[in-house]
Amino acid sequence: MFGRLRTSFGRFVSSMRVDVVTSEDQRPRNLFEAAAAYVSACAEDDQDRIDEAATWVSPEALSFGVNELACRAVIALARERDESPRTVARDLLGLPAA
């Protein structure tokens, strides 16, 4: 059962890849590279890099990648702070403790 789930997820991730070749390094970008570039550009308020990263994959793939990056970041911070992911997420958003 888990093998089938892994295979299905692998196919899904593979389907999100885009065969767009960039002039920078002549290789295709994947959704996680696009998400990392997009989020870091947003954090630095660099509109040119935001626009460029948004063209590497479809909007749906970029949304999935940004969501996955956010989940991983919250989990990493929660482990680092020895707190629950819920507490860390609420703290990052400036929400009161639940």
Image (cartoon, rainbow, N blue to C red):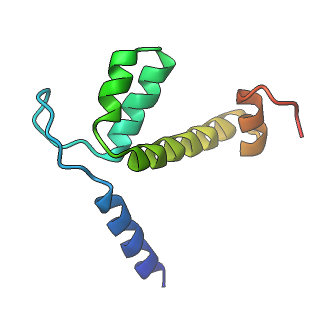
Image coordinates of residue 47 in percent, x first then y, are: 39, 17
Residue 29 relative to residue 32: left or right: left
In the displayed orientation, state which residue is furthest to the top.
45
Q: What residue is drawn where x is 42% and y is 81%? A: 4
Residue 40 relative to residue 70: left or right: left
In the displayed orientation, state which residue is furthest to the bottom.
1
The image quadrant where one finds the C terminus is: top right
Image coordinates of residue 45 in percent, x first then y, are: 47, 14
> Residue 65 versus residue 91: which sits nearer the camera?
65
> Residue 64 versus residue 68: which sits nearer the camera?
64
Q: What residue is drawn where x is 56% and y is 40%? A: 70
Q: In which quarter of the image is residue 65?
A: top left
Residue 84 in sight: no
Q: Is residue 43 above or below residue 90?
A: above
> Residue 55 versus residue 7: which sits nearer the camera?
55
Image coordinates of residue 73 in percent, x first then y, are: 57, 38
Residue 51 in sight: yes
Image coordinates of residue 46 in percent, x first then y, are: 40, 14
Q: What residue is drawn where x is 18% and y is 49%? A: 19
Task: Give the total of numbered labels.
Answer: 0
Q: What residue is drawn where x is 66% and y is 41%? A: 79
Q: Is residue 24 above or below residue 86?
A: above
